[in-house]
Amino acid sequence: MNITIISSSKDPASQNIRNKLLEAARWKPVGKRYKYKNFRLVEIDALHIYQDGIDRRLEDEGIKSDLLIFVSRHEGKDERPMLTVHFTGNVSEAKFGGRPRELAVAAPHAARALLLSLKSSYDEVTMEATHHGPSSLHTPSLYVEIGSTKNQWYLDAPARIIANAILALKVISGRVAIGLGGSHYAPRQTKLLLASDIAFGHIFPDYALDQMDEVMLKQAFEKSGTNLAYFDPRTSAQQRERLRHLIHKLGYTMLRESDIRVHAHKNL
């Protein structure tokens, strides 16, 4: 699998991870890029979120990718040190890059593999809900981030853990579901992912569910590569019933938590 890692000169955490990647392996300079085994390391001079079509531009330069990994900072009101993984896209308007009502192609198995690796070396790791750009990408992609404040962005340890996890990435097969409901940090989906064979594609928290109509649901399933959906148990009965009706109408399947527990390898 050809993996392209994209760092931004505008993002201090991104630069930190890039430096740890360069320290961790013997990269070969190829013009302004670097190559190591099946990895390419590409630096851009703009923020990642505005990089719609970057996979096509890289292909024009001869860099064909099976997976794009954007290394970035995470900033949030929750100031806990954490490492996050998420997919990109917008369920309504595009305030922070990407296009309105467009989702990028997710990479669920790669995200799960990264989270499992990160969790082995760092206390707080989590999936996040789908948010911001870029959205116009035909190559599967994901973000992996250092959070949640600038105090963490410059630290050696989290950047090194992310760099090592990327370079050791081995995609694990298994079931995939889209996630519906819960909070932005997807605690239930993260716990299930770390404790069973399930991987998650696009995740939509409670605050985004009103925007999830038939068109967006169909796009979420297709760009996650699955026909399964999982509801956070705290999702309102009204939202659950509305979305269940649409899911059945589209011909997709609801995955019960008991179905996931059958394959659990830790205490859920």
Image (tube, rainbow, N blue to C red):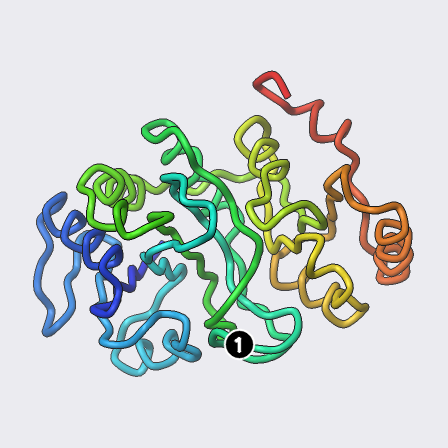
Nearer to me, 134 or 150: 150
Task: Indicate the quadrant where residue 81 lies.
Answer: top left
Q: Is residue 15 left or right of residue 198?
A: left
Q: Residue at x 41, y 71 (%)?
A: 49
User: Considering the image in quadrants, where does the N terminus appear?
Assistant: bottom left
Q: Residue at x 37, y 48 (%)?
A: 148
Residue 119 sits above or below residue 208 on the image: above
Q: Position of residue 84 (x, y in %)?
A: 43, 46
Q: Is residue 249 left or right of residue 193?
A: right
Residue 234 sits above or below residue 92 on the image: above
Q: Residue at x 45, y 53 (%)?
A: 76
Residue 219 sits above or below residue 61 on the image: above
Residue designated by label 1: 95
Task: Indicate the quadrant where residue 196 lies.
Answer: top right
Kind of residue indicated by mark 1: Lys
User: Considering the image in quadrants, where does the C terminus appear?
Assistant: top right
**Looking at the image, how many numbered discs can be counted on the residues?**
1
Q: Residue at x 79, y 35 (%)?
A: 256
The crowding category of the residue bearing disc 1, from other C-alpha atoms within 10 Å (few below 14, some 14 to 19, many at least 20), is few
Q: Position of residue 162 (x, y in %)?
A: 29, 43
Q: Is residue 64 left or right of residue 102?
A: left
Q: Is residue 157 left or right of residue 117?
A: left
As helix, strand or loop, the secondary structure at mark 1 comes to: loop
Q: Position of residue 55 (x, y in %)?
A: 38, 74
